[in-house]
Image (cartoon, coloured by chain):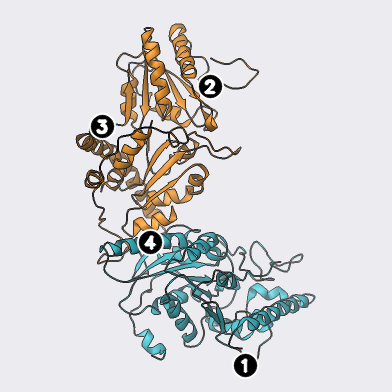
Amino acid sequence: MSTCIGAAAAGARAVTATSSAGLAFMYEVLYVAASSRLPITLACVNRTLTGPININNDHSDSMGARDSGWIQIYAENNQEAYDNYLQAMRISETPDVRLPIMICQDGFITSHAVENILLEEDDAVKKFVGEYNPEHALIGRDHPLAVGPYDTCPYCMEHKVQQAEAMKNAKRAVLEVAADFEKTFGRKYGFFEEYKMEDAEIALVLIGSTAGTAKVCIDQLRAQGIKAGLIKIRVFRPFPAEEIASALSHVKVVAVMDKSEGYSSAGGPLFAEVAGACFDLETHPKMIDVVYGLAGRDVTVQDIEKVYRHLLKILETGITGPRYIHMGQRSSQKEVF
Amino acid sequence: MAYNLRKELQKPERFVAGHRLCAGCGAGITCRAMMRALDEGDKAVITNATGCLEVSSFQYPYTAWEDSYIHSAFENASATACGVEAAYKALKKRGKVKENYKFLTIGGDGGTYDIGFQSLSGAMERGHDMTYFCYDNEAYMNTGIQRSSSTPQFASATTTPAGSVSTGKKQNKKNLTEIMAAHNLPYVAQTTFLGNFKDFHEKAHKAIYTEGPCFVNVLAPCPRGWQYPAHLLPQICKMAVETCVWPLYEIIDGKWYLTYRPRKKLPVEEFMKMQGRFKHCFLPGNEWTIQTAQEYVDQQWETLLEKCENI
């Protein structure tokens, strides 16, 4: 990451890839990259953070970096991961954004999957991504550039606020680039994907490859007349709070699925964000947090069905019960579902 | 062309006045001399580790650097410089950059011997075309004079304070110059501020204009940490060399050369007595500390002489 910071400041495109502890090791410099407003692209193959050591998939690595000032885009499958990479540089290099971007996908589940995807021609991709010629750089410009000052109290907060504004601008940039991507390559992207949400009474909100599993489950439940739906988050930073609230406004019961543990004692990070986003809704859906799939724990269609069945029970009884649940534990205590 | 200080001083300054370093600080002197070693017309990018120099020379919205400069963090100055250098090569290949650039990295002993060591070692091993200058003031001066692996034995630091139960730091100074030599670099040198700066200038120039990764270790006293009146800095540097506490030498393609041999090697106390950090060594009952320091310097010096080709 330090090398990418140097290269990006020098005016080149800088790309790196990491996972798990490798990302955690970069924690300090992730903030340096974002605050220096360097549009670096990082491929993050999501794997759990050590403690105890384990190498399998969950989102604890990138969730730990969620406040570092990076744009974060997640993928369900390899086609989406590929398409997100094609859009990454244009989003992060947008002049009123200039923030680094993390393209995330589930470790092993999609990173090691054998899967057919549609590859675009190099020429078309080069044309879509374009050249990068930043206005200021350490080398090759008429004026020298100074990067990374000691930022004193009279200025530092202003710079942090500018960075926060840039992240707001990234919302617009994500949609603009997605629109051009659809026009060029035909595949449509937004902040999140809604699956059978129009009339959904119960819904899940989740990130990543589990969406595929949930969609199969939804099709089965729909065949039984159960109005189940799914929101699959693509863009976690910037967080599309208003849009998610709007998409959930008509839903009765929601389970937010966290694939990382925040040890907050009150739920995972995605739950906190979604619950916060819905706070201003006139009528709230009932909402629970299901922490699942940590450290590579497998998630099957049956597991997802249990969650929907639990939501149905809440819908029928009107009693939310425990709001912070861990899925499928080896435990002598009675399972919530 | 023979070195001429007067002529060198006529070059435009590239590290300018207005920085906030203390009077009598070795870091600013290192920077001015380092920048003077660049040939006029050559552009440069300076990478700097966090430390006194960084917070004093680039406080937003002011900078003392006339050239492009980047600070990223404490531990990663070398890795950051690698990125700049790699980008330069890539952009130059594509015709996006026309001019010639030199890549200089500078850090204190904390950012070099300790926190930035992994980054430095990796950058040197990968062979980036850059020169790393360490301004070695032998402790974490910016954060309040905590000991580093460069602090010499018996120096009093805030984390190794001398007093009734302690005689300062227990361990010897890490020999980083030799560790860098073990990386088989094309050029490694040790210098400090002496007389007309010929030794510093020639070594810095050689390092900057030798292709590949080069390392220059500069003994750069700190008036707060070493506790001396600002005007005594040149004498302290001179005594460091005359006592062989800080020998001057260079290693060119694996061959060691002594660049200065004191006519008469002075006792180590001549160096120590000028500094408050060794004051306790001169108290009755602590004579053994000076004796131990002398034995260590003698042993190091003899080992160095054995390595040098020109002895």
Query: Which chain is painted in cyan?
Result: B
Q: Nearer the viewer, residue A214 or A134?
A: A214
Amino acid type, callout 3 = Arg
The answer to whether the residues at label 2 and label 1 have Cβ atoms under 8 Å apart is no
Q: Which of the numbered marks, if any, corresponds to residue A187?
A: 3
The tag earlier along the polypeptide, 4 or 1, is: 4
The N terminus of chain B, quarter of image: bottom left
The answer to whether the residues at label 4 and label 1 have Cβ atoms under 8 Å apart is no
Residue at the (38%, 54%) spot, across then down: A154
Q: CA distance from mark 4 to mark 1?
A: 45 Å
Residue at the (42%, 57%) spot, across then down: A3
Secondary structure of the residue carrying tag 4 is helix
Q: CA distance from mark 3 to mark 2?
A: 36 Å
| Callout in the foreground (4, 1) | 4
Provide the residue designation for mark 4: B86
| Callout in the foreground (1, 3) | 3
Secondary structure of the residue carrying tag 3 is loop
Question: Which subunit holds the residue at mark 4?
Answer: B
Amino acid type, callout 4 = Ala
Q: Residues within 10 Å of mark 1 (few under 14, many from 20)?
A: few
Residue B303 percent across, percent down from the top left: 67, 79
Secondary structure of the residue carrying tag 1 is loop
Q: Are marks 3 and 2 on the same chain?
A: yes
